[in-house]
Image (cartoon, rainbow, N blue to C red):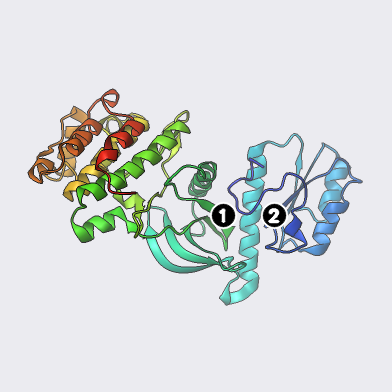
Amino acid sequence: AQALAGLGGVVDEGGLRADAGGPGPPPDLIVLEAASSSDLAAAAAVRAGASRLALPLVVTGPLDDDLVARAYAVGADEVLVEPVEPEDLRRAAVVLLERSARRRLAAAGPAGAARWELGAVLGRGQTATIYRARRREDGAVMALKRLAPGAPPEERARLLAEADLLRALGHVPHVVRVRDAGVDAGATYCAMDLAPGETLRALLEARGRLEPGAAAAVVRALARAAAALAAEGVVHGDLKPSNVLVGPGGEVTVVDFGLAHRATEPTPERRGGTLTHLAPEVVRGGATTAASDVYALGVTLHEALAGAHPWASAPGADLAAAKVEGLAPDLGGLLALDAPAGLVAAVEACLAGAPAGRPTAEELAAALLPYAAAE
């Protein structure tokens, strides 16, 4: 179950899913365990009811030449010898799902047979495009983060890993929920709830800046999310206004976990984010941590209050050098706007050059509470 989590659909550890032959959408792939070559009736039944084009089938079992031969004879697409390594099972599933998707698309002709109907583009990243999309089988409308067909294997693995992580964080407040992930029409995707509203970046571009109460409320919600992530041992690594959705009722949702990772794991080699929001230790080549997430929240709070980040007057090269040298940012813009002293102090604390000098996300959320508009 853990090996297949995030590939899409429901993993049933007890046997065939009820909807394999009953109501609801059919499974995308079936894995059957066979104890011996005489234990392949279920595999034969699966193949009798669905072609390889419609339903890939993996059989696992002991090292037995007769079992392997008969499993392929009854229609298995892949046979894995037990004990099966999770990485081998996941690799086989990804290959079979991609192959099945390509075959379905080719068999359908020009009209295509994609599981998802793509709509408006909601955003674009370095490697993925986010669409408003409708799942054909049940009409569900979601935000679909999708790689182009033929994307490099490492990018496909990264997106599926992001989906896996988000599934494990389904209980964390203010974090986007993943509902489905896998391969469709040759493209790897991750389907998420379509959160209401627009990005904080778009909101600031339209309004210039937020009122102090609204700014404190938005960043307090982000701090609560960051605190919950830290409690789960997870670092977001890319907190910034373009990765935050703000709904019409003030709902706040953190999106884009492409650089997120568990604190016990190495920082992803593919660095990203925006230089203005990266903590000095990260610019110097250090790991992203819960403290560097707090630094990014401090920059975001400054932007929400002043309409610009605290390094607005520094060109990119000068900014990188300033962060490497540990120079303090200029908070004069906040003082000129007569922002509440407590919010200025919160920004200053979050932007401390040394990680140990910053508050935790939980402490930041508590500090912002007196200033936050009704949540």
- Say what secondary structure mark 1 lies in: strand
Q: Which amino acid type is marked by label 2? A: Leu
Q: Residue at x 39, y 62 (%)?
A: 122
Seen from this angle, which residue lies furthest left?
A: 336
Q: Residue at x 52, y 47 (%)?
A: 163
Residue 172 seen: yes
Q: Which amino acid type is marked by label 1? A: Asp
Q: Which numbered circle lies on residue 180?
A: 1
Mark 1 crowdedness (10 Å alpha carbons): few <14, some 14-19, many ≥20:
many
Q: Nearer the viewer, residue 370 or 314?
A: 370
Q: Earlier in the sequence, mark 1 or mark 2?
A: 2
Going by the image, does 177 lie left or right of 136?
left
Residue 319 position, x and y percent, is 17, 38
Residue 316 position, x and y percent, is 18, 43
Residue 268 seen: no
Q: Which residue is mark 2?
A: 29
Q: Nearer the viewer, residue 8 or 138?
A: 138
Seen from this angle, which residue lies furthest right?
A: 38
Q: Which numbered circle lies on residue 105?
A: none
Mark nearer the viewer, 1 or 2 = 1
Going by the image, does 85 lie left or right of 122?
right
Seen from this angle, which residue lies furthest top?
A: 356
Going by the image, does 220 lie left or right of 20?
left
Residue 298 lies in quadrant = top left
Mark 2 crowdedness (10 Å alpha carbons): few <14, some 14-19, many ≥20:
many
Residue 120 lies in quadrant = bottom left
User: Where 229 falls versus 264 (above or below)?
Assistant: below
Q: Residue at x 22, y 58 (%)?
A: 205
Residue 325 position, x and y percent, is 18, 28
